[in-house]
Amino acid sequence: MRLSGLFLLLVVSSGVWGTETSSNATQSDAEKYFDLTEKLEKQWKMTIKGTIKPLMPFMLKMNEEDDLSGSCKRSLMLYLSGLNQAKVWAIRMLDATSKLPPGILQGTFVDYGSFDECLAVEATGGQFIGQSCAIEARPPLPPLSPGFTLVKAHLGENNGTLSGYFQVAYEALHHKKLRMVACVPSTCNLQDMRVIARKVAEETDFDVKIPQCYKKEKTSLQAIHWTVIFFLGLLLIMCIIGTAVELFSQKKTSTLRNMLEAFSLYSNSCRLFSAPGGSSTEFCCIHGMRALTMCWVVLGHTYVLMDFELLKDPSAIQNWFRALEFEFIHNGWLSVETFFLLSGILVTFGGLKFLQKSKGYFNVPVMALRRYIRLTPPLLLLMGLVFFLPLIGSGPFWYQHVDPQVESCTKYWWASLLFISNWFGIDKGCTIVTWYLAADLQLYIVALFFLLILNKYTKLGVTILVTSIVVSCIAVGLQTLVNNIMPSAMISAVNNDKVHQVLNHVHVYTPTHLGPYCIGMLLGYIVFKYREHKLNRGYVIAGWLLSILFAMSSVLGSHRFSTGDEESRALAILYAGVHRVVFSSAVAWVLYACITGHGGPVNTLLSSAAVAPFSRLTFMVYLIHPLVIWTRLGSRRERHSTTHYDLVYEYLANLATAFALATPFYLLLEAPLSNIERLLNTRPNKSEETQEKSIK
């Protein structure tokens, strides 16, 4: 582009401007340079006139459009006039507008433009400023064939005509829209831009949408922000007081002192970074399992939450789905089953220890209320942080990644606080993680009744747990059959509606996770009753081999479905119904082997003191990490590479940031609440009641 040539000349000639000299040769070079810039400006004016002339009929139509505001019409004409006169502010607006992206034949249909350059534009006389508007456009397309996946998409032939190329590649276009950004006058509001988009659609037969526009505006703190700041400040003050009391006060122990010391940053930091110990050392392997699972969750979300339309060379994604090992990411939805399994183990083990000391009784409503109180403050913190997101970032596609989270929290905060958001769908709660909290609490309440039966009528209790596992598998299979959905939420299916069907009908569905939870309860019962029992070497080897087989088949078994090679509906329903239970059984063996002394090097790794701090931060990381990912995606100014090398860097950055942010929130909120709960329950026959430490 000639403007790029002018910019290059400006850079190269900077030494001429920065040096004073009387040399005739240098003066001659300077004169040549300035002559060249004048020629470039004349050429610019000729080019822009040639460009504007074909647009004039369309502009005249827009000028007669009643739905377009007068201020927008005047600003657009001023913008065209500025371009015609080679005004720098107008050229900046054009420069900040997206161009045809390089690599379009490789599926790169997005150009971010220059977001910050656009927002910095101010027209002569301050009549308007620059405004960045996202554009989504898609041509009319033939329907996809049933069972289509991205792996089957044809990207066209390397020879032949351009029209022939796109006629063959139409399937991939279902997965892609043309995503661009236009820098327009701020006096054209969103409604004005949608009127223009409608007219463009009529002229081109494209489906054109303007989802959102951004301009430079002053941000101010609202009531919700001040409320969050107030409570965080209050927690910080309590932590400072608690730390001072612990370190400097010499008074005797009292209830008030203990309550204040519960907020001590010193003791809570020591506890966070301490090695696991005490009476529950046989459960140290759970720390490692919890931490590794959290890393898996963040890895999966780093890939899944990306919008493939915004990637550079997204045709490379086909190679992702062709690789068998990619199922560890593609089928990463299984990671959450480990959390349900761990909750089942700890609820059962801790509950049976308590029932042993309390003559077989506990108050179910009180236990459920305590669980609710334990989960709610961190959830409120998450909701408060969501409302801060608009204040900390911006970007051309911020509307897609961040704005929906704020809107969802505004609409469905009540469902999240009542822990019923999973009844309405994954998008009907405050962020994508609240469904898990709801399902966990619901299963916890069910588990309390199962525990009472298991403690008093062991055979009946075991029968109920086994039956619940079978019922869970059948329920998932029926959901898959009746709703005609995929066996797993496979993003290779291109159609986001199909993915959301699986998430809404199966993934957030509480009975789906009843099987893994009950497997955890069975394991908790076995460990409670028989943890001193040693297996012979043959059983141990068989257990490890079956565990590996179960884990690999459940995780990798989705590969033929994700590539579209497996078309058997019966097999898809069977896989959908049983793969979560099969995977949970594999994890259950690993934990059982480690707890009972058959874990070997696996137990050494999972029980390492180094992983314990990461395990304790898991709950906060689980809540915060989607905000980290969304903020990163929404604030991007350029296309992201599709290489695993770059995406692993992205993942490690997300993981490190999430753990870094989780640490202060753990010290400010989660650790003090845990200490206070422990103090309230430290009385005869209740010291073991809170043995179950929620995995969340």
Image (cartoon, rainbow, N blue to C red):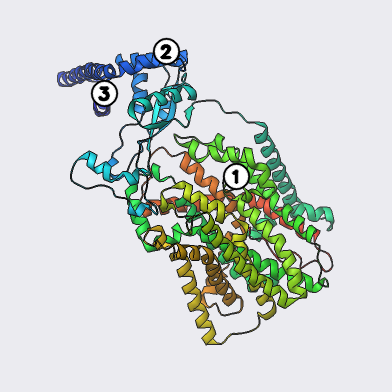
User: Crowdedness of circle 2 by 10 Å Cα count: few (<14), some, many (20+)?
Assistant: some
Left or right: 641 as drawn, with respect to 600: left
The amino acid type, in three-letter code, at marker 1 is Lys
Q: Which numbered tag is attached to residue 428?
A: 1
The amino acid type, in three-letter code, at marker 3 is Thr
C-alpha distance separating marks 1 and 3: 64 Å
Residue depicted at x 79% and y 58%: 365
Q: Nearer the viewer, residue 238 or 99?
A: 99
The amino acid type, in three-letter code, at marker 2 is Arg
Circle 1 — which element?
Answer: loop
Circle 3 — which element?
Answer: loop
C-alpha distance separating marks 2 and 3: 44 Å
C-alpha distance separating marks 2 and 1: 42 Å
Residue 70: x and y, percent? 46, 13
Residue designated by label 3: 19
Q: Marks 2 and 3: which is nearer the front?
A: 2
Quadrant location of the N terminus? top left
